[in-house]
Amino acid sequence: MPRTSPLPKAELHLHIEGTLEPELAFTLAARNGIALPYPTTQALRQAYSFTDLQSFLDLYYALMAVLRTERDFADLMAAYLERAAEQGVRHAEIFFDPQAHTARGVPIGTVIDGLAGALEKEGGRHGISGGLIMCFLRDEPAESALETFEAARPYFGVITGIGLDSAEVGHPPAAFREVYERAAAAGLRRVAHAGEEGPPAYVREALDVLGVERIDHGIRSLEDPELVARLVREQVPLTVCPLSNVRLRCVSSLAAHPLPRMLAEGLRVTVNSDDPAYFGGYADDNFAAVRAALPLTGEDERTLARNSFLAAFLDHDEPRRAR
Ligand code: HPA
Ligand code: ZN
């Protein structure tokens, strides 16, 4: 029977820059007098054929050139929240990549003010609570992450936590120990991408060296039974992104996705959308895709939705300052 309204859920793995739909990209390009190297939105969409994480990242960073003003960032957030509301998202902890913008000369305050302002205003309008997670680019030097962290300090009141993203292989987590220590001292929550393309050792390192509270992706953890046992024992949330995994060829097809095995192992797994404008779907689209391709029960789906709230940085977890 078709579901009439999507299950309420929390979105815990979403890059706001990855919600930039081609139509908005063209609108912002026109507004800012930027020429895109594609004649139409259709031509741009046709370029969304990726062979691995890096092939996606190249396009993802290039298209960010259209994001320049506080209003651009606010419009991006507002467009995302409207989609999220339709998809049953009630709480969203949203990644952003400050270095990808400051490297282009956009001040960090422009980025954060635009995103945080729209999250508060439009989130309130749609009944979506949320937070911002500032991610550092792991293929940039750790010093750059530290400088970015300090530049963001005046904005910590609107930042929930920090994360680590971009090209994973060859960029193990341990190099970012100091920025994670400073984040912990500042009362920020800590997550990191690990085990997407990188080995299970990176997942261990993120836990042991960076002290992360959630692992983003983490699917390659399954290659290491001892690590799986630990993740189960400690109920470390894994923010899995099924459509992303297929589009970036981390998994050969949705039917081959390890989500059912992860649930069966007792891992605290959640379903998320990563970069929905590029990978073919938002939060409930990911739920619908796994429902169609995998042997999941209704109870499994409810577990996934429940896990998303249990894994969220909500007040039940550890009260922080009011946001
Ligand atoms: N992995 C790493 N970095 C990213 C991703 C991802 O899936 N999406 C956006 N930045
Ligand atoms: Zn991601």
Image (tube, rainbow, N blue to C red):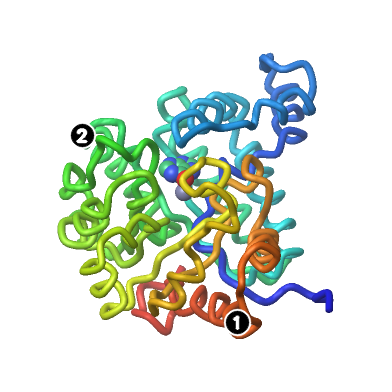
* Neighbourhood count class around disc 2 (C-alpha, 10 Å): few under 14, some 14–19, many 20 upward: few
The amino acid type, in three-letter code, at marker 1 is Arg
Q: Nearer the viewer, residue 257 or 182?
A: 257
In this orientation, does residue 135 appear?
Answer: yes
Q: Residue 92 appears at what percent x and percent y? A: 56, 64
* Residue at mark 2: 143
Which structural element holds mark 2? helix
Mark in the foreground, 1 or 2: 1
Q: Quadrant of residue 147?
A: top left
Taking 230 as reference, is 171 above or below it? above
> What residue sits 73% from the left and 56% below the top?
83
In this orientation, does residue 74 appear?
Answer: no
The amino acid type, in three-letter code, at marker 2 is Glu
Which mark identifies residue 302? Answer: 1
In terms of sequence position, does the residue under pointer 1 or pointer 2 come before the other? 2
Which structural element holds mark 1? helix
Taking 256 as reference, is 176 above or below it? above
Taking 116 as reference, is 147 above or below it? above
> What residue sits 62% from the left and 44% below the top?
279
Real-space Cα separation, disc 1 to disc 2, in angstroms: 42 Å
Quarter of the image for the N terminus: give it. bottom right
Q: Residue 56 appears at what percent x and percent y? A: 52, 32
Q: Nearer the viewer, residue 48 or 315?
A: 48
> What residue sits 27% from the left and 62% below the top?
212
Q: Nearer the viewer, residue 266 or 16?
A: 266
Q: Residue 26 appears at what percent x and percent y? A: 74, 27
Q: Residue 14 appears at what percent x and percent y? A: 53, 53
**Left or right relative to 26: residue 195:** left
Q: Nearer the viewer, residue 2 or 191?
A: 2
**Left or right relative to 206: residue 18:** right
**Left or right relative to 156: residue 3:** right
